[in-house]
Image (cartoon, grey):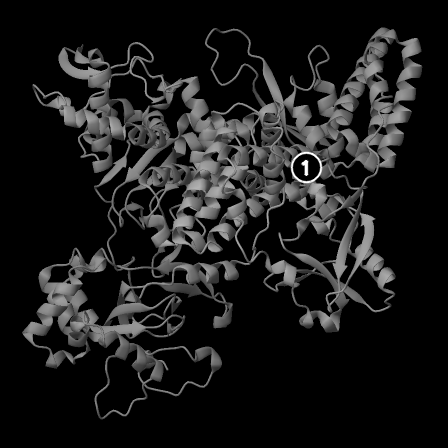
Amino acid sequence: MERERGGARDVTDADDADDVDDAGPPPASSGSIISPKMVAVHTSAHSSASAEWIICLDKRPAERSGEDVDIILARLKNVKAFEKFHPNLLQQICLCGFYECLEKGITLYRQGDIGTSWYAVLSGSLDVKVSETANHQDAVTICTLGIGTAFGESILDNTPRHATIVTREFCELLRIEQREFKSLWEKYRQCMAGLLAPPYGVMESGPNNDRLPDKDNLSSNALGSLSKNLNKIPSEKILRAGKVLRSAILSRASHMIRDRKYHLKTYRCAVPEVPGACSAGHPARELHFQDKYLFYRFLDDEQEDAPPPTEEEKKESDEELQDTLLFLSQIGPDAHMRVILRKSPGQRTVDDLEIVYEELLHIKALSHLSTTVKRELAGVLIFESHAKAGTVLFNQGEEGTSWYIILKGSVNVVIYGKGVVCTLHEGDDFGKLALVNDAPRAASIVLREDNCHFLRVDKEDFNRILRDVEANTVRLKEHQQDVLVLEKSPSSGRTSNHSGASTHYKYTVMSGTPEKILEHFLETMRLDSHFPDADPALDDFVLMHCVFLPNGQLCPMLMHCTYHAQGSQGSEQEKLDYALSNKRRVIRLVLHWASLYGDHLQEEEASLAFLEEFYVTVSDDSRLISALKEDLPELEKIVKHKYHKVLLRQFSMGDERLQKRQPIRSNDEILFKVYCSDHTYTTIRVPVAAPVREVIAAAADKLGSAEDLLLVSLSSAGDKVVLKPNDVSVFSTLGINGRLFVCPRNQLDSLTALPEQEGPTAASFGTFELMSSKDLAYQMTVYDWELFHCVHEHELVYHTFGRQTFRKTTANLDLFLRRFNEVQLWVITEVCLCNQLGKRVQLLKKFIKIAAHCKEYKNLNSFFAIIMGMSNPAVSRLSQTWEKLPSKFKKFYGEFESLMDPSRNHRAYRLTVAKLDPPIIPFMPLLIKDMTFTHEGNKTFIDNMVNFEKMRMIANTVRIVRYCRSQPFNPSLANKNHQDVRSYVRQLSVIDNQRTLSQLSHKLEPRRT
């Protein structure tokens, strides 16, 4: 029922069954219909001992005593929405407000209704849904209102509701009816204005911010601004870190802290003049200061005659030093970034610009921008922070002066008359439209939470970068159509040329037709340098051409159009020189292309035929042109290479895992079981990359079935996925305990999981408890490296764009990703099957040790899998187990978990990896996420041309994999004989049903009441 319309009505429409009215308690004689659901909610709410204020609010206003008002007032003073209200206004609200208590899924009012009440959220949250049609079923959620927000101000002028409001969870609201709200508004307009959206509220920018002045005034104002920031009281954690570090320096290298003169003043400060004078960390791995020319001042030294640390303080500092250094190393990069962004653009060094540019690579809002634009932005971005929620960055209707990117926090987008229309979060941007269109701001931006950080680009810089990009864009046209778009930039880097000497430029392909892109790369290829290191752009082409120019088109183009191309202008000698250099470039390209594909070339008969024809042609030409003989031996080696024969694979849980992994190729054949609804099975043999229709045909042939069959992936939880006829290589995409079933459509609902899919019923801790944690980690690393080394670079491309597009397998990548899930589930399974509390504590310690050794071996894939397994709800909820874990292990786990922090696009992890040398086994799911992020955020074709900037970004991620494998992983002979450990880690038995794991967890430690 909807009492906001003034009357009561029975609810008969199913869609309206959860509607609730929002009028006050009806008179006793009114006979209004009360929803049983509402009665139940109120009863349960009133049964709470702490709900005295609710009982007071439930009374009619005329019946509330002074004591009732005091009780309500005490509660409302703690509500965020009312914290700035005058006491007199709060008292009036206590006299006229009503309490509403709603279950999840209740519709408070619908878009288009005429409102009768205003609301403030006391607890819970509500979804704001807007529909562009009259049908409320089309409504989409545009934002969520949380504790302390207020809504419903349209009652001031009787305009229809701008949105539908639905409770997201159990909610408590304070409601004020229209007449009383209007009366309060007239009397306390100024006080209430800050709470309402325009046009009722007057929005002012908040004073508590760290907004730096415009660049023109930066030099004169920056020092004052920064000194003001330095005077802010640091957090307790920072203060403690400062004390610990000061104490450590004084006890280990006291000469580093002494009086120094600066601008005629004397300061007591520290400067690590000798790198490593104060070193900390692992005894064999000192941490040296790199910023040895900076002064550091400690707060304790601001006092005159500050006493040195006592022996007790020195002892405490020594114990805390490792944790302190870890904490400072985690916040250091952010602090460094802020220091750079607070410099005026003219003061930023080349190293500064590189640090900012690296940060911009991982910001969602900038993913579609070219490398050149990102580098330009690195020079002009300004850091801006605001301390308080409710601060207004700009108002609707104002002139647009800046573009913002959210680094941390979130903001509400507010439109006059509509209130909050959406919320923007970390990585989103806003304010660009007003700059592009030179139009007033289309909305107001209000901080949704405290302590928000932004990157800001001012209008002048924004327009200059746009102008520079267009001015440096070269367009090649044919028949009035763009066929190639190049970006011109100085080849010497980002530093400007002040010497007056001529600047050399390079041209970067941004987009183009496949033919013109190939033509451009061949024309600009340098023959005097080692390929491909000298030209990563050409490497981008070889890596990514399969997306827009498959081998079936590339090979004939190279053979007939490019290799035999002749010069059309100049003397005969110039034409001969052109033809020779052209042939040599094509040979170089073919050599690199064949090298990258490797054994995968044998999957395409046309490609092998091309190589043989190309070799014969070059051999014939070399008899006339001796310069071509230089590359002939390498070409001959590729053509005469004995390619890997077709293998018969058995994809099972058995002995194949114990053998050294060999890369799986699309034309390998596979034996695997396909099950029927009665749990019988047939074993079929098909190519690895066979499409589903071929698998079904093979199964039907073995079963002798003429029915129309479906191929179904069935998980251990009973979840069914009917596979599409064009899906390829489906065997490698199954869940850990998943199986393939074939059945007629009418038997689909009757399919049930096999008993073996449920996984183990007893823990295997007894088996691996006595195995060395280091040996386990080592053997896991050996196996993970084998799987990782089998992944072909092109599989990453196929996975990103969809392997069915290429009719290629990504089986090696699938199995490597599957291994991550397997290790994660192994951790959860072992913990949940361990019935003894003491054993579970030992198990957690064991996993933390294994994770530490995996990190030491640079096996970040298994390291993350173990830590994510331990943070799974089925494990993390076992409070009794965690309570008994020694504090040393809790610290290790906390340190490891901090590397999993997803904020700033997994910045903590990326900084850790940047310090490692190969061989490295990376956290593969994050690389996949990066490529998917780039793929989905950028079009593959723009104006019928290939978006080559997108190809470049994906190729850069693929090269990370190449870098990780650029050094061999050589298994140590010391571990050669640990066959039991090797066998165990390659045949992990797990439960992959999260529901089962949760049930086991609750049996171990039931929920505390």
> Quick one: quadrant of the C terminus?
bottom left
Q: Is residue 271 visible?
A: yes
Residue closest to the eye, 209 or 973 = 973
Q: Is residue 819 above or below residue 752?
A: above
Please identify the quarter of the rendering in which residue 215 is found.
top left
Residue closest to the eye, 202 or 828 = 828
Which amino acid type corresponds to the residue marked 1 in the rendered image?
Val
Q: Is residue 185 above or below residue 179?
A: above
Residue at horizontal 87 percent and vertical 36 percent from the top: 605
Q: Is residue 643 found left or right of 544 in the rendered image?
A: right
> Quick one: quadrant of the N terminus?
bottom left
Q: Position of residue 1007 (x, y in %)?
A: 36, 63
Please identify the quarter of the rendering in which residue 161 is found.
bottom left
Residue closest to the eye, 265 or 979 = 979
Residue at horizontal 42 percent and vertical 62 percent from the top: 1002
Q: Is residue 122 above or below residue 943?
A: below
- SS class of the residue under badge 1? strand
Residue under label 1, please give it: 946
Q: Position of residue 799 (x, y in %)?
A: 66, 43
Residue at horizontal 19 percent and vertical 34 percent from the top: 232
Q: Is residue 438 visible?
A: no
